[in-house]
Image: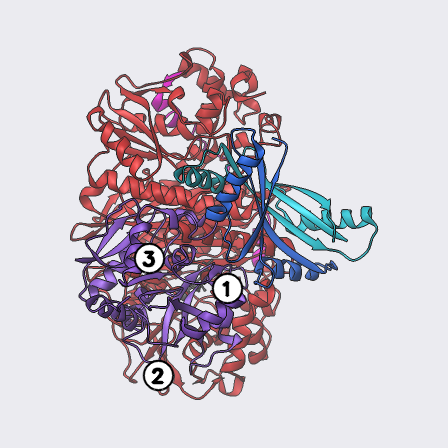
Chain colours: A red, B purple, C cyan, D blue
Amino acid sequence: MTIDTLAPDAHRQLGMTDEEYDAVVEILGRPPRPAELAMYSVMWSEHCSYKSSRAHLGRFPTEAPWVVVGPGENAGVVDLGDGWLAAFRIESHNHPSFVEPYQGAATGVGGILRDIFTMGARPVAVWDAIRFGPLDDAKNRYLLSGVVSGIAGYGNAVGVPTLGGEVEFADCYSHNPLVNVMALGLLQREQLVLSAASGEGNMAVLLGASTGRDGIGGASILASASFDDASGAKRPSVQIGDPFEEKKLIEACLELYERGLVVGIQDLGAAGISCATSESAANGGMGMDVDLDAVHVREPGMTPGEILMSESQERMLAIVTPEDLDEVLALAEKWEIDAAAIGTVTTGGTLRVEHDAELVAELPAVSLSEDAPRYHRAQSRPAWQDELWAAGPELPETVDVADSLRRMLDDPALGDRSWIFEQYDHMLFLNTVVEPGHDGSLMRIKGTEKGLAVSTDGDGLRCYLDPMRGGARIVWEAALNVAVTGARPYAVVDNLNFGNPEKPEVMWQLVETIEGMAGACEALGVPVVGGNVSFYNETDGVDIYPTPVVGMLGFCDPMPSRPPRLDRATDGDVVWLLGPEDPEDFAGSAFARIVLGNTSGRPGDVDAVAGAAVVRLTAVLAYRAPVLHDVGAGGLAVALAEICIASDVGVHVDVADWRRLFSESPHRVVAVLPDSAVPDDSVPAVRLGVFGGDVIDFGELGSLPVAEAASIWRDALPRRLG
Amino acid sequence: MTTAVVVFPGSNCEHDVVYALDALGHDAELVWHRDIDLSGADGVVLPGGFAHGDYLRTGAIARFSPVMAEVERLATEGRPVIGICNGFQVLCEAGLLPGALVANRDLRFICRPIRLRVESTDSVLTRSAAVGDVLTIPLNSYEGNYVAPAGTLAEVEDHGVILRYCGPAGEVDAAFNPNGSMDSIAGVCNDAGNVAGLMPHPERAIEDVLGSSDGRVLLESFVAGIRNPVPA
Amino acid sequence: MRFRIDITRREGLSDPEGVTTARALGDLGYDVEHVAFGRSIVLDVPGDDETGLRSQVDEMCQKLLANPVIEDYEISVVPG
Amino acid sequence: MRFRIDITRREGLSDPEGVTTARALGDLGYDVEHVAFGRSIVLDVPGDDETGLRSQVDEMCQKLLANPVIEDYEISVVPG
Ligand SMILES: Nc1ncnc2c1ncn2[C@@H]1O[C@H](COP(=O)(O)OP(=O)(O)O)[C@@H](O)[C@H]1O
Ligand SMILES: [Mg+2]
C-alpha cells in the first residue's frame, strides 16, 4: 500500500481516531481522497498539531515590550534596540537520533536553522541539549559519539558555530536519547519576514534540495504505519543531511530578503510540501493552487502522495510576485540551488493540488492547522509520588569530602565537557566572548556595545522528583547562568520532552512542569517566545523523566569589557557565596546520586524574591568581578573546584558543616572579588575564604590537590569515550 | 587595488577575514569563485570553511573553480597568496603548495586554541614575526593532519616549513601535536615564499576580547607582503 | 585471511557527495550519468576457516564497520 | 558503461581511519592484523568503447577523483 492507494478507512493505520476521521469528512463534506487523508493525518498528528499540549501552553507568559514575534511563528523574535532583532527557537530530534544518531542530530540542526532564516535572520549560533543512558553501555557511547559528530558535521560545515549546550545521563534515556537543538539568528528590523502568503496571483517557489522518497511521514505517526514497510526496506525514513545545500540555501534566502524579493517564506518540515503550502496560505488567509509536476524530484516515478508528503531536507517555499520571479530564479542559479514555481496564491482559502492534470487534493487550507483537534487529556498525580518523596537521601554524620569530590568530578555530567564542545566550531563570526566551558556563553554583536548570553538548562531527575519545583529551578538556573556574564534574563524558549500523553500521570507531570516554569518566568519578567513539545518518549511502556529544557536568552548593553570567566581567579582573591543557603537540599543532587546512590526525595523549592535579587546583583557584579560562577550540580564544592581547575590556583575555605559543600539549594553564586568589601546588602553574602596555593582546602573537612582534581575532571569523558 | 578574499560555495570564514584585515587597516573585497578577473587584486586570501561541502576530498573541487586560474597567475607572478584552513587545503590540491591534509589522528573535529612556533620568516605569512615566536591561535578542522610523501617532505623540511604545533615553551613534541601532522607541521610556503598556507585561523586571534591577538603578526606579514611583494 | 568489505549507501537515500561530484565532473566537461560513493575496508584476520572468519567479519560490520541503518555491505575474500 | 574506481592511501602515508578502526576492533575483542581504508566511486559514462572511456575515467581520476600526491587508484569495469 502507498499513500496514494490508501483505503479511506486506513485512517487508523495512520494514527487517526474515528472521531478525527469523521471531523475530516465533516470538513470536506465527503470522504477524503487518499492524499488528503495523508495530509490530515500528519498535520493533525501530535507532532504537528500540539493537540495534547496546546491547551496548557497558554499558561506561559508571552508578553513583554521587547517581544516582536511571540509563539506561533517559526521562531520568537525580540528587540535589542537600534534596529537589531534576535530570532531564536529550540527543537527536538529525539526519535530520529535514536534510529541514526549522526543523521538524526545533523538533520535536527538543519531543521532548527531553517526556522531561524525563515524569519529573515542570519543564523549565528547553535546550542545542543542532549541526554543519554549511562556510558558504561556501548550502545549509549555509540549514540553520544554519533550525535555529537552529527551536530559537529552539520553545524561546522553549514557555517554556524555551536556556542554551548548541556548533557545529562540517566537510565531512562537509554532507549530514548534526547537531542534538543537551539538556534539564534540576528537581523535588522526591516528584514523581518513572516510565513504568510499574500497577494492573489503571487507565486510559490520551491527552493533548495530536490524532493525524494526519504523521510516520508518521518515526523509523524505515519513513520510507524504499515505503508512504510510496504514501501520497502529500501526506503527507510532516515533522512540524510546536506549542510552544503543548506549553506547555499541560507545565503540565497538572505540575499532574496536583502533585495526585497520575498512576500513571505516558509521552511519545509513535517509533511513537506503539503504543510508548507497549506500553512503559508492559511497564515495569509488565502488559498493556493499547487502543481506537483513542477516539483524537482530526485527519483523517477514518485507518486503525488510521495511528493506531497516527502520530508526531504534543505527546502524552503518562498512567496514572490510574478514580476520578481525571474530575478528570484536567477539568484537561485547564482547560488547553485534548484528553484521552481510550484504554486499560485489564490483567494477563497482553498488548497488545490494537481498532478498529471489530475486533482489529488482540494481542501480548506486553514482546516489542516486551525481545525486540528484539541485534547484536554486526563491528568492524575502519580501514585508513586509520595513514596518517591519519602525515600529521600539519608545524610550521614560525616563524609569523606575529598573522596566524594573525586567521585563527583569523575561523573560524565559534571566532568570536563570539552570532549564534546571542542568538536564544534564555537568561534566562527568572531562573536564568541565567553566560549563553552564556563556558565552561559556570551557573544558580542559587532559594531555595537551589545552582548547576548545564552544558557540551555534541564534537570530530568529533579523534574521527575517534583515537576513543578524542577521546572521552576531550571528556569532560575538558566537565569543565573546568563547573569554571571552581565546579561539580564530577556526571553525564553522551551522544549518539553515527555512520555506518553495518553497516560494521566504524564499529563500531570506536563501541567505541573509548565506551572513551575511559567511561575519562574513571571517572577523574572521574561516572556516565553517559542518552544517545542516532544511526546511519546517512552519505551516498552516506560516513560522518560519529564524533561523540560529551557533556552534562556540574556541581553546586556553595554556588554562588560572584561566579563567574568572561570579562569581569572588569582592568588589572594577573596571568594564569596551570594544568595540564600539551605544546607539540606539533597534530593536530586549529584552528591545523593553519585555518592549515596539515591535518586529520590523532594527537591527544595525556589524563592522568587530572593532569587530575583541574586540574579539582579550578579548581573551588576559581572562588570567588576573577575569570576562569577553559579552553584549548580555538585554544589559549592564542585563550583569551587571548577574555578580552581580553570584558574590553576588553590583555595582555602572554612565551612564547619560538610553539607554546605554539596547541598544544591538554588539561587547561589560564587563571587570572586579583588577586595574584601562586602559586595552588597541586597542578598545574603558569606565570605568563604581566599584563593592561593595549589590545594582545594576545606580545612577540617579535607582537601584535594588542584592537579589531582584537574586530571580526574579532564578525564571524565575521554576515559569513557576514548 | 584591494585584496581578494575568494568565496567558494561553502566557504564560511570570508567575512571574518575581511573583518580582521580591516582591523589592520587593510582593504579587502569578497570575490565569487566564478569571477575570472583578479587583475584588480594585489593579493589573495583563500578563507576557511567547507568549499563544496568538502565532498570528494577537502579542496578537491574548489581548485577547479574558474577563479583559480587567476589565483595561480598571481601566485606565479609573486603576489602574496595565502590559504587559511580550507584555503590551505585548496592550495595543496591545486599544487601551489606541497603535501596534503588528511583526517585528524583521532578522527574528531578539533576547535580550540593551540600553540604554534614560528619556524621561518621567509614567507608572506611570517616575515613580520621572529623565528621561535610562540603564538596562540585557534585550530578549527577535521582534516588538518599534514602529510607528504618522503621526497616532498624532505624538501618541505628544507625550506618550506613556516609553523609547527608546539608546547608553552615552544617545544615541538608528539604531546603537542593536536592532529598527527607529520613533523608537527601547521603551515608551509612555496619556494618563493609568496604563497603560504596554514591550518589554524589567524583571523580568529586579532583581539584580546576574543582570547588572543597573536594572529595579528601573521596577517600583518601578509599586508606587509602586499605593500612590497617578494620578487618571483 | 584477507577480507574486503564494500560499503555503499542504501538505495533511496540521498547521496549529496555523489551529486556534488557529478556536477563537478560536468563542469570539467565530462559527461557522466551517475556517481555513487562507497567505502571499502580491507582487513587481515588470522586463521583459514573461511566460513567461520567470514561470519566474524560480518559481525564486525554489524557492530562497527558499517551502519546497517543507512548502508549495505558486501564481504569478499581477496588474495592476501 | 559503468566503471568502478578504488582509491587507497599510498603506502607509508598515515591512514587514521585504518589505525583507529583497528584499535576499535581490538577493543571489541576481535583479532585483526591490518586494516586499510579506501573509497570507491561508481560512475556511469555513456558509450561502449571501453578503452576510450577507460582513459577518460583515468583522466578524471588524475584531475579530480584521486589525489596522486597521497592516493593510488584502480579502475575496473563493472556490470551496469
Ligand atoms: N552538549 C554540549 N554541547 C556544547 N557545550 C556543552 C555541552 N554540555 C555542556 N557544555 C558546556 O559546558 C559548560 C558547562 O555545562 P553545564 O555544567 O551544563 O553548565 P551549567 O551547569 O552552568 O548549566 C557550559 O559552557 C556548556 O555550554
Ligand atoms: Mg552554571
Name the residue beneath numbered marker 1.
Answer: B147
Under tag 3, what secondary structure?
loop
| Residue A438 seen from this side | no
Q: Is residue A696 magenta?
A: no
Identify residue type, mark 1.
Val
Q: Residues within 10 Å of mark 3 (few under 14, many from 20)?
A: many
Does the residue at mark 2 contact the one at mark 3 (Cβ under 8 Å)?
no
Name which quarter of the figure residue A136 lies in.
bottom right
Q: Which residues are magenta?
A: A362-389
Taking depth in this image into account, of A135 and A229 the one nearest to the observer is A229
Image quarter in which the C terminus of chain B is found: bottom left
Q: Is residue B184 above or below residue A514?
A: below
* Residue placed most toward the observer, A76 or B163: B163
The amino acid type found where label 2 is placed reads: Val
Image position, residue A219 (x, y; %):
49, 35
In-front residue for pair B147/A660 = B147
Left or right: residue C48 versus residue A551 is right
Callout 3 amino acid: Pro
**Residue B172 got which mark?**
none
Above or below — where is B4 with respect to A706? above
View quadrant of ligand 2: bottom left
Mark 3, mark 1: which one is toward the viewer? 1
Label at residue A574: 2
User: Which chain does tag 3 point to?
Assistant: B
Q: Is residue B137 something that shows in the picture?
A: yes
Closest to the camera, between mark 2 and mark 1, is: 1
Mark pair 3, 1: CA separation? 21 Å
Quarter in which the N terminus of chain B is drawn = bottom left
Find numbered disc 2 in the image and state the secondary structure of the residue it sits on.
Answer: strand
- Residue A519 spot, x, y in % from top left: 36, 52
Answer few, some or many: residues within 10 Å of disc 2's Cα (few below 14, many 20 plus, some between 14 and 19).
many
